[in-house]
Amino acid sequence: MKHFKRIFLLVMDSVGVGEAPDAADFGDEGCCTLGHIAGQAELRLPTLLSLGLGNIVAPAPGLRAVEHPLGFYGRMAEVSPAKDTTTGHWEMMGAIRRCAPPTYPDGFPPELIEEFSRRIGRGVLGNRAASGTEIIAELGPEHLRTGSVIVYTSADSVFQVAAHKDVMPLEELYRICRVARELTHGEFQVDRVIARPFVGSAKAGFTRTPERRDYSLPPPFNYLDAMIEAEVCVTLVGKLDDIFAGRGYRRSLHTTCNAETGSALMGLKDTGAGGFYFANFIDFDMLYGHRNDVAGYARALNEFDGWLAGFLAGWRRGDLLILTADHGNDPTTASTDHTREFVPLLVYHSHASNTGAVRDLGTRNSFADAGATVAACLGVSGTGELAGEDFCDNICPSPTSEV
């Protein structure tokens, strides 16, 4: 049975809520993105706290539990043996990875780089794991002088190509990345090839621009595919069209920052059209987590909370909100990489207070519980092979009634 007309699943990219049980296996003992930010910066999150955010993370300044939250709250653990963006979102949609995606901490093999260079007709600089802003600052002048592209990777399974817009038009950079995508299958596989255009100068400093583009591996069959087969109108907002390799949706609004994503969602909410809306708020991770910017991360959280208050104003009967994250990225650690953490689970609908249900959804065994719940609450069948246990019965007045 269809319980809701519309479901909005919003991913607060990297907003983890405490170390996962296997955090030590990833070198992430003691991490807690949200809690550690609260300990070092001022958080003002009245909307998120009213939904129950403070009930799922250790108490800290600006993070308090509420006795009667407006929503349902819990946390989710990741099953897949990785902590990257692609893995987190795929698992959310029911596709569990059994093996970690290949990474290249020592750079890519010489034979791959040589073939890439031959195919694009340019030299290659870098070829190592690095912070994007740092390697561009270091190699940008040589890139401007020689026209050689900057190639780098990270702790994630990514092949990143950076080029200055004065040296290389965007379409040429995108073409080069498509060449890299062709080469990074099989023996040299990576999850994503990422185009990283930048501007500026050595004197004034270099800045990456919003025209980033990701070229992803196609995901396994997942809840998005099942919803499309069931003729649910699926709308992706943010970078999710890239993460799911252009599949599993009817329309996509490709946005490049939190402000654009929030604005797009406001417009979609006002249309009243039914279906599933899946969005990623990228700034937390891209601008602040990876740069260990605690103050910036806190500011972005406060701004998101203010936006969320407006988004929930006049929330309609038949609408469901699910808030979560795809991994952690604790900006208080020495590393700039993602962290292996539980992610928050906050759920709200306008008649939540009438359900009489227990508010605590507990610790979910997989991110896939989010996708399973979306599918179940929209009445989508034929998903038996996908991972995840839905919590529809926990949030609806009864298993057979429509909210």
Image (tube, grey):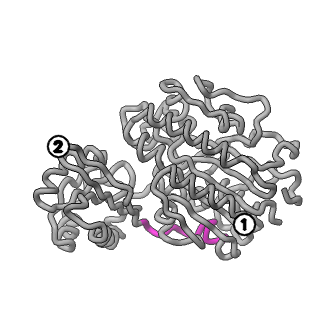
Does residue 301 belong to the magenta stretch? no
Residue 29 visible, this orientation:
yes
Residue 183 visible, this orientation:
no
Q: Quadrant of residue 195?
A: bottom left
Q: Quadrant of residue 123?
A: bottom left
Q: Nearer the viewer, residue 136 or 32?
A: 136
Q: Nearer the viewer, residue 253 or 195?
A: 253
Dot 1: within a 10 Å radius of its alpha carbon, few (fewer than 14), some, or many (20 or more) residues? some
Q: Which mark is residue 325?
A: none
Left or right of 202 on screen, residue 307: right
Seen in the picture, residue 131 relative to 192 is either above or below; the reply is above
Dot 2: within a 10 Å radius of its alpha carbon, few (fewer than 14), some, or many (20 or more) residues? few
Where is mark 1, residue-wise?
274
Residue at the image point whose x is 49% and y is 71% from the top: 246
What is the three-letter code of the residue carrying label 2? Answer: Lys
- Sequence-first disc among 1 and 2: 2
The segment highlighted magenta reads 216-227
Residue at the image point whose x is 58% and y is 23% from the top: 61
Q: Which mark is residue 203?
A: 2
Seen in the picture, residue 400 relative to 351 is either above or below; the reply is below
Q: Secondary structure at mark 2?
A: loop
Q: CA distance from mark 1 to mark 2?
A: 51 Å
Q: Quadrant of residue 403?
A: bottom right
Locate residue 304, reporting x and y percent.
Answer: 57, 42
Residue at the image point whose x is 54% and y is 67% from the top: 252
Tags 1 and 2 touching, CB below 8 Å = no
Q: Nearer the viewer, residue 184 or 170?
A: 170
Left or right of 174 on screen, residue 394: right
Locate residue 192, reporting x and y percent.
Answer: 39, 62
Does residue 222 belong to the magenta stretch? yes
Q: Secondary structure at mark 1?
A: loop
